[in-house]
Image: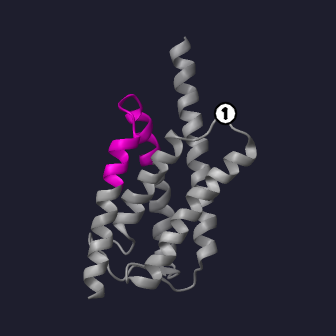
């Protein structure tokens, strides 16, 4: 029964994220979304494999690439990068620092809460030598890195357009 729930959760994540991307990524900003998505995939590939290979987290039940990789393809390569795209596209650039800090915290906390629920009710993820606060910290940090990269790339783009 739990295995069926795992499949349902994983397939639902793909469907929900696909719908969110179609709704919240404007056509004129698809390129921006792709840059954020690919950069976050690079980061999560590195951190995700490191954490799994060091035995800190395991993903016992995976729908995709079970023999190729020990990390969760759905989370590391689609859901998290897709959320990062939305994070960067809708970042409150003109708000104050407290609001921006809360924006980072809200995104990181939301993912951490869903992860904690998945740990409790599914067999999609297991903490071995890890805790929810490490997930929160690493997500916050990777959102910050992706924001720095996004600003850098699109600042360069704006400078090139002005020439």
Q: In which quadrant of the rendered view does residue 137 lie?
A: bottom right
Q: Which residue is mark 1?
A: 94
* Residue at the spot 32% in from the left edge and 80% down from the top edge: 61
* Residue at the spot 55% in from the left edge and 13% down from the top edge: 162
Q: Nearer the viewer, residue 31 or 6?
A: 6
Q: Is residue 73 left or right of residue 138?
A: left
Q: Which residues are magenta?
A: 17-38
* Residue at the spot 66% in from the left edge and 33% down from the top edge: 94
Give coordinates of residue 74: x percent, y percent: 35, 64
Is residue 107 visible from the viewing direction of this image? yes
Give the answer, above or below, for where 124 lies relative to 15: below
Q: In which quadrant of the rendered view does residue 118 lie?
A: bottom left
Give the answer, above or below, for where 37 lies relative to 150: below
Q: How has the structure been colored for display?
A: one colour
Give coordinates of residue 13: x percent, y percent: 34, 63
Give coordinates of residue 145: x percent, y percent: 60, 50
- Judged by its main secondary structure, the magenta piece is helix
Give the answer, above or below, for where 51 lies relative to 127: above
Q: Is residue 88 magenta?
A: no
At numbered mark 1, what does the secondary structure look like: helix, strand or loop?
A: loop
Q: In which quadrant of the rendered view does residue 149 lie?
A: top right
């Amino acid at each position: 029964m739990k295995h069926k729930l795992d499949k349902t959760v994983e397939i639902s994540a793909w469907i929900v994220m696909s719908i969110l991307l179609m709704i919240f990524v404007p056509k004129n900003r698809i390129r921006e979304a792709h840059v954020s998505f690919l950069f976050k995939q690079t980061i999560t590939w590195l951190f995700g494999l490191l954490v799994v290979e060091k035995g800190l987290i395991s993903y016992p039940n995976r729908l995709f690439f079970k023999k190729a990789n020990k990390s969760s393809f759905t989370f590391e390569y689609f859901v998290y990068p897709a959320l990062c795209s939305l994070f960067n596209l809708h970042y409150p650039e003109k708000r104050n620092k407290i609001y921006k800090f809360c924006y980072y915290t809200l995104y990181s906390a939301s993912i951490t809460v869903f992860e904690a629920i998945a740990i409790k009710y599914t067999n999609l993820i297991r903490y071995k030598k890890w805790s929810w606060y490490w997930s929160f910290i690493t997500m916050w940090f990777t959102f910050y890195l992706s924001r720095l990269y996004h600003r850098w790339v699109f600042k360069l783009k704006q400078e090139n357009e002005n020439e």
